[in-house]
Amino acid sequence: MNRKKLQKLTDTLTKNCKHLFRAFDKDNDGCVNVSEWVHGLSLFLRGSLEEKMKYCFEVFDLNGDGFISKEEMFHMLKNSLLKQPTEEDPDEGIKDLVEITLKKMDHDHDGKLSFADYELAVRKETLLLEAFGPCLPDPKSQMEFEAQVFKDPNEFNDM
């Protein structure tokens, strides 16, 4: 499989996955090595709920401090919601959404989400896994990727 075809395949799988590089680069060396890439693909294609929760939490924890703060929630929601032409200040609606989200997910009431808060909320309602924006491939993209990759195993001999 040539570079262009592999790039097209991975683009299909990851088109809605912002912050992918940061989450795959586990050792923070600025490179995604083969081991990190294979681990990331494994999670995308066959990961358990536990693995996906850890991955999504890492993606949402923008500054890597182990918490999802109000500011991080605001930033992610602002970037993932469609802009509606209204007279209202859109930031106010997003701030309200952050407060609603905290009421639902912040179980220890400290004003930020720890992994324990996030995990408890997601286990109660799995739709909250990607509460702050898409970070996992959608099922259609996943099926397209698998269909192409597993169609002809001999294609990988060209790499």
Image (cartoon, grey):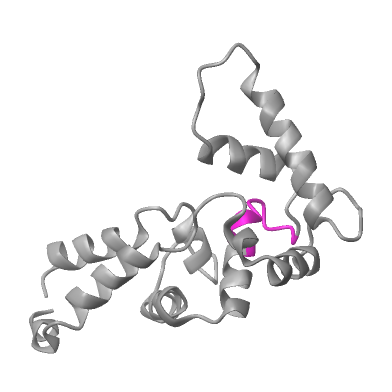
Residue 148 drawn at (x, y percent): 18, 74
| Whole-percent x, y for residue 75 in the image | 62, 38
Q: Is residue 62 magenta?
A: yes
97 to 156, vertically: above or below: above
Residue at the (11%, 84%) spot, across then down: 152
How many numbered discs, if any? 0
Q: Can residue 112 be seen in this view?
A: no
Left or right position of 38 against 105:
left
Q: Quadrant of residue 41?
A: bottom left
Left or right of residue 12, residue 70 in this image: right
Q: In which quarter of the image is residue 12?
A: bottom left
Q: Is residue 136 above or below residue 78?
A: below
Q: Give the vertical position of 67 relative to 98 (above or below).
A: below
Relative to the observer, which residue lies in front, 72 or 147?
A: 147
Determine the residue positioned at 60% across, 11% down.
87
Residue 12 falls inside the magenta stretch: no
Quarter the C terminus occupies:
bottom left
Q: Where is residue 62 in the image (x, y as percent from the top left)?
A: 63, 51
Q: In this view, does 93 lie above or below 140?
A: above
The image quadrant where one finds the N terminus is bottom left
Left or right? Give the position of 124 relative to 126. right
Residue 2 image point, x, y percent? 11, 70
Query: What residue is at 73 percent from the left and 32 percent from the top?
Result: 95
113 lies left or right of 94: right
* Region in magenta: 57-66
Which residue of the protein is positioned furthest toward the top in this rendering?
87
